Amino acid sequence: MVAAEAIRRLSPGCCAVATYPAMGEYPKGRDETTETDRRRAKKKIAALWESIGFERFREEVWLLDTAQQTPIDLHQQHRAHLKALSHAYRTVRRG
């Protein structure tokens, strides 16, 4: 949700946003991280990007076309889901 918000706020005037999956953190340490760990992390990152409207472009490069309606719709769906979770949490905390 944070990534989608940042992209929406920073993308006016841009025709596309490009990204490339890579691990930013190494739970086991960089030297102990296996290729299987890296592939698993990239797969999870790609699934997240796809959920906010990115599409695979070439090899491991992903693009989000800021002119398409789909990313906007997905962003609104994620916002609504987050709002519902927040409301449910507050309701449980009060009750």
Image (spheres, rainbow, N blue to C red):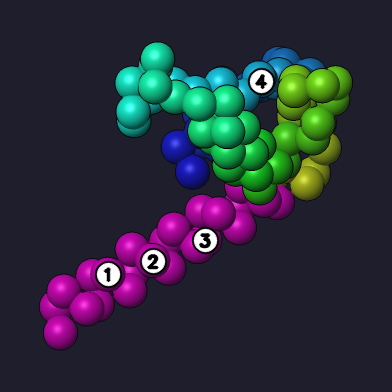
Residue 63 marker? none
Whether residue 25 is situated above or below residue 77 in the rendered picture: above
Disc 2 element = helix
CA separation, marks 1 and 2?
6 Å
Question: What's drawn in magenta, residue-wise?
Answer: 73-95
The kind of residue tagged 2 is: Leu
Residue bearing the label numbered 1: 89
**Left-right relation of 44 to 56:** left
Circle nearer the N terminus (4, 2): 4
User: In the image, what residue occupies the spot 50% across and 62% down?
Assistant: 81
52, above or below 89, in the image: above
Disc on the earlier residue, 4 or 3: 4
Q: Which residue is mark 2?
A: 85
Residue under numbered circle 4: 19
- CA separation, marks 1 and 4? 33 Å
Q: Residue at x 64, y 39 (%)?
A: 43
Q: Which residue is mark 3?
A: 80
